[in-house]
Image: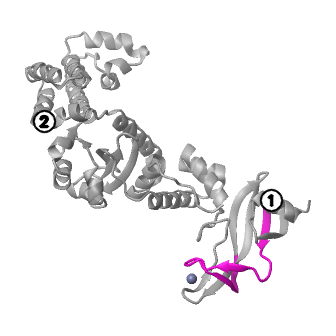
């Protein structure tokens, strides 16, 4: 088989394109392949698909293709231009790449797969592209995926704020609770941030939203009320967010108590931050002994933790009536604990009580929210290289958007 024929097959070139020449440069670890079409081939106008004769050819361009046996492989061609009576002179589409891309679609496909598996730096090393090239592929993939998907209104919506950078820089993340995917991201955590999502939806899409899980955060609640009918029956102040507030309260208690004990030379709470953040069933075995002693001690922190853990049971009841009894007992205990951070959270929950109890109408589990939250957290940690908020948003869509990211051609 001739090398040109071989490369026509390796590259998967489609008719009418043929390989006219192959050159190997061992010094540069490079294979250069030129593609041509036979004379008098007709191409279509990219705007209207009308078949037209070739008008002329653009300058030669190159596309990075999949490596051949660890050799960089570049495809070169002069793209034909057609003159459409309606749309003027345009470059015809080539079957191996999307317009404007400097990579073939097969290469972009591989790049998307590699970017899914590792961080951007790692992916760029494996693919032997620059950071900007690798990131450019991810950005185009997200833009293409969002365009294909259009607007979506899940039946069960989750809304969450996420710190996007240092200080008070936040984004609002809207998710599909059942699918565990991110459907929309906007800047900041204001009422307008969530409005921006609702405003993309048609009335019948808005009507299809049955429940919205949010934190006890007035701007989000106001936005839901402004956009959904009977909003108060649909708002769920969910377990994930409530338990996060309780976790923060326990940590505040622990910090203060640790400071006091340390001043007396007592190290009982030193280095225990993460022990108290675990829920009882998730505590790793290696910490069991130390934590067992701590939780049975008469420390304030141990009491705050026990109160927090007891609240978790609220969402395990089948019937709302039983949950309400549990709540009354719990609220009495929490508000009589003489632990101010715990009392504060208990009162905040009570102010939002009706929206907590809507859980029993919708049964929105928080597993999805917890899973998404930890995955966004992982993207953030990995995202030292994301440089800015827009890149962070792109990365979230790329990994968690459930989008079809592949290029169309090839
Ligand atoms: Zn046309």
Q: Main secondary structure of the magenta part?
A: strand
Residue numbers of the magenta segment: 31-60
Percent coordinates x, y for residue 169 in the rendering:
30, 53
Quick check: can you spot residue 29?
no
> Image point 60% across, 58% down: which residue?
130
Residue 98 or residue 272, whichever sits in front: 98
- Ligand 1 neighbours mark 1 (CB distance < 8 Å): no
> Is residue 240 or residue 16 the one in the foreground?
16
- Report the residue at 75% width, 69% height from top: 15
Q: Is tag 1's residue or tag 2's residue first in the polypeptide sequence?
A: 1
Residue 294 visible in the current orientation: yes
Q: For disc 2, does the CB lie below 8 Å from ligand 1?
A: no
Residue at the disc numbered 2? 354
- Location of residue 320 (image quadrant): top left
Secondary-structure class at tag 2: helix
- Specify the quarter for ligand 1: bottom right
Disc 1 element: helix
Res. 66 mark: none
Label 1, label 2: how many angstroms apart (C-alpha)? 65 Å
Q: Where does residue 277 sit, x and y in percent of width and height?
A: 31, 26
- Asked if the magenta segment contains residue 39, the reply would be yes
Q: Which residue is mark 1?
A: 9
Q: Quadrant of residue 98?
A: bottom right
- Quadrant of the drawing holding the C terminus: bottom right
Q: Is residue 52 left or right of residue 175?
A: right
Magenta stretch: includes residue 379:
no
Q: x%, y% of residue 268?
A: 28, 15
Asked whether the residues under the numbered discs 1 and 2 touch, taking CB atoms below 8 Å apart as contact, a structural biologist would say: no
**Farthest residue in the bottom direction?**
85
Callout 1 crowding tier (Cα within 10 Å): few <14, some 14–19, many ≥20: few
């Amino acid at each position: 088989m001739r090398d040109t024929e071989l490369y026509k097959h390796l590259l998967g070139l489609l008719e009418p394109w043929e390989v006219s020449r192959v050159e190997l440069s061992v010094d540069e670890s490079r294979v250069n392949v030129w593609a041509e079409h036979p004379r008098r081939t007709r191409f279509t106008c990219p705007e209207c698909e009308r078949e037209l004769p070739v008008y002329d050819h653009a300058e030669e361009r190159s596309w990075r293709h999949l490596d051949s046996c660890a050799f960089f492989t570049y495809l070169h061609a002069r793209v034909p231009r057609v003159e459409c009576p309606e749309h003027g002179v345009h470059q015809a589409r080539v079957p191996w790449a999307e317009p404007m891309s400097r990579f073939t679609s097969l290469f972009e496909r591989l790049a998307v797969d590699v970017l899914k598996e590792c961080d951007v730096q790692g992916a760029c090393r494996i693919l032997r592209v620059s950071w900007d090239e690798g990131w450019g592929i991810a950005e185009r993939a997200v833009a293409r995926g969002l365009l294909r998907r259009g607007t979506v209104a899940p039946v069960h919506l989750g809304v969450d704020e996420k710190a996007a950078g240092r200080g008070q820089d936040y984004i609002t993340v809207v998710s599909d609770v059942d699918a565990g995917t991110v459907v929309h991201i906007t800047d900041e955590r204001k009422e307008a941030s969530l409005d921006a999502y609702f405003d993309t939806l048609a009335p019948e899409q808005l009507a299809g939203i049955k429940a919205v899980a949010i934190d006890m955060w007035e701007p989000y609640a106001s936005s839901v009320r402004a956009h959904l009918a009977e909003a108060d029956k649909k708002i769920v102040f969910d377990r994930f967010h409530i338990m996060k507030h309780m976790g923060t309260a326990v940590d505040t208690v622990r910090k203060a108590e640790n400071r006091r004990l340390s001043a007396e030379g007592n190290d009982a709470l030193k280095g225990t931050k993460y022990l108290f953040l675990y829920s009882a069933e998730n505590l790793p075995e290696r910490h069991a002994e130390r934590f067992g002693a701590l939780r049975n001690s008469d420390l304030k922190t141990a009491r705050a933790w026990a109160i927090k853990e007891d609240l978790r049971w609220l969402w395990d009841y089948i019937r709302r009536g039983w949950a309400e009894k549990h709540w009354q007992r719990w609220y009495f205990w929490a508000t009589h604990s003489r632990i101010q951070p715990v009392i504060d959270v208990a009162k905040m929950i009570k102010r939002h009580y009706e929206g907590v109890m809507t859980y029993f109408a919708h049964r929105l589990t928080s597993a999805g929210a917890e899973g998404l939250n930890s995955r966004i957290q992982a993207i953030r940690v990995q995202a030292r290289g994301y440089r800015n908020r827009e890149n962070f948003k792109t990365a979230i869509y790329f990994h968690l958007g459930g989008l079809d990211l592949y290029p169309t051609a090839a």
